[in-house]
Image: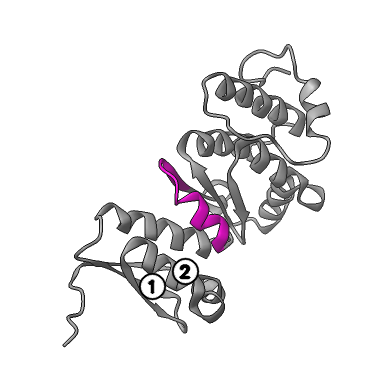
């Protein structure tokens, strides 16, 4: 007789109903990968978006937080592939900015700020992602940032600068300055892939650390 693994703890995460399919994956592939990798069971209510995470007795208790972050990231619009990759590494975190908390209920302000964060054809969001090696998803009224802790902090600061109305050029200078500093300190192990970034970076040389002047 097969003995089922004991469940030592359970917790719940709420995600939008429209993101349930992404969490489950084709043929249950994403759900299965999360369960097998982290030693958990996921009970997903498709009609409500409520996810029960059951930690099995043989699992590392730290896996519970990791799995919850993966689920939350997917719920906020980050692709399952990126979420699984990011949280498969140490020191990964998820930070969510509530734009309504900052801007209030003004729909016009929300649309305007989201436009600044996304940029033409998504270029602003993509640039922040590339320069900080993070995954960023901008949904109805939230901005979700996933990545290594130090990189998420840089991306968060850049996004908050844009929300407050700082010019894009000032924010790019800040990002390139921080990228150079992190590279010197050994945190940067990637190169940006967006076409034209290298030439843009050259225009920021000579700026003070932080690049917020002007």
Q: Look at 48% across and 40% down and name the residue there.
A: 148
Q: Nearer the viewer, residue 48 or 163?
A: 48
Q: How many marks?
A: 2
Is 85 included in the stretch rendered in magenta?
Answer: yes
Residue 87 magenta-highlighted: yes
Marks 1 and 2 sit apart, C-alpha to C-alpha, by 8 Å
Residue under the point 19% across and 84% down: 2
Counting from the top left corner in percent of width and height, residue 175 is at 65, 29
Q: Which residues are magenta?
A: 80-94
Where the C terminus falls, by quadrant?
top right
Residue in view at x 69 percent, y 30 percent: 171
Residue drawn where x is 31% and y is 58% of the image: 64
Q: Residues within 10 Å of mark 2 (few under 14, many from 20)?
A: many
Q: Position of residue 67 (x, y in %)?
A: 38, 60
> By what rule are the colours in the image chosen?
one colour
Mark 1: secondary structure: strand
| 174 versus 137 height, above or below | above
Asked whether 169 or 135 is in front, the reply is 135
Q: Where 154 sits versus 213, above or below?
A: below
Q: Position of residue 181 (x, y in %)?
A: 58, 20
Q: Left or right: 82 with respect to 3?
A: right
Residue identified by numbered label 2: 15
Residue occupied by mark 1: 51
Vertical arrangement, residue 107 with respect to residue 211, above or below:
below
Mark 1 vs 2: CB contact within 8 A:
yes
**Quarter residue 59 falls in:** bottom left
Residue 34 appears left or right of 7: right
Seen from this angle, which residue lies furthest front? 1
Res 40 → quadrant: bottom left
Q: Is residue 167 above or below residue 115?
A: above
What percent of the width, then of the height, locates residue 80? 54, 63
Callout 1 crowding tier (Cα within 10 Å): few <14, some 14–19, many ≥20: many
């Amino acid at each position: 007789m097969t003995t089922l693994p004991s469940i030592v703890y359970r917790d719940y995460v709420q995600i939008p109903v429209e993101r349930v399919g992404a969490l489950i994956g084709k043929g249950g592939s994403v759900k299965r990968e999360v369960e097998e990798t982290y030693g958990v069971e996921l009970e997903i209510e498709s009609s409500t978006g409520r996810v029960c995470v059951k930690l099995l007795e043989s699992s590392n208790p730290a896996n519970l937080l990791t799995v919850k972050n993966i689920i939350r990231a997917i719920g906020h619009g980050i692709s399952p592939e990126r979420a699984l990759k990011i949280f498969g590494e140490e020191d990964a975190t998820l930070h969510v900015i509530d734009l309504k908390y900052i801007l209030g209920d003004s729909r016009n302000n929300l649309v305007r700020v989201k436009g600044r964060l996304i940029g033409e054809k998504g270029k602003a969001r993509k640039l922040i992602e590339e320069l900080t090696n993070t995954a960023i998803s901008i949904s109805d009224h939230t901005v979700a940032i996933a990545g290594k802790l130090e990189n998420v902090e840089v991306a968060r600061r850049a996004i908050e600068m844009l929300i407050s109305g700082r010019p894009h050029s000032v924010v790019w200078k800040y990002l390139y300055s921080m990228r150079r500093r992190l590279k010197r300190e050994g945190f940067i192990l990637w190169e940006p892939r967006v076409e034209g970034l290298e030439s843009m970076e050259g225009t920021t040389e000579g700026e003070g650390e932080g690049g917020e002047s002007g």
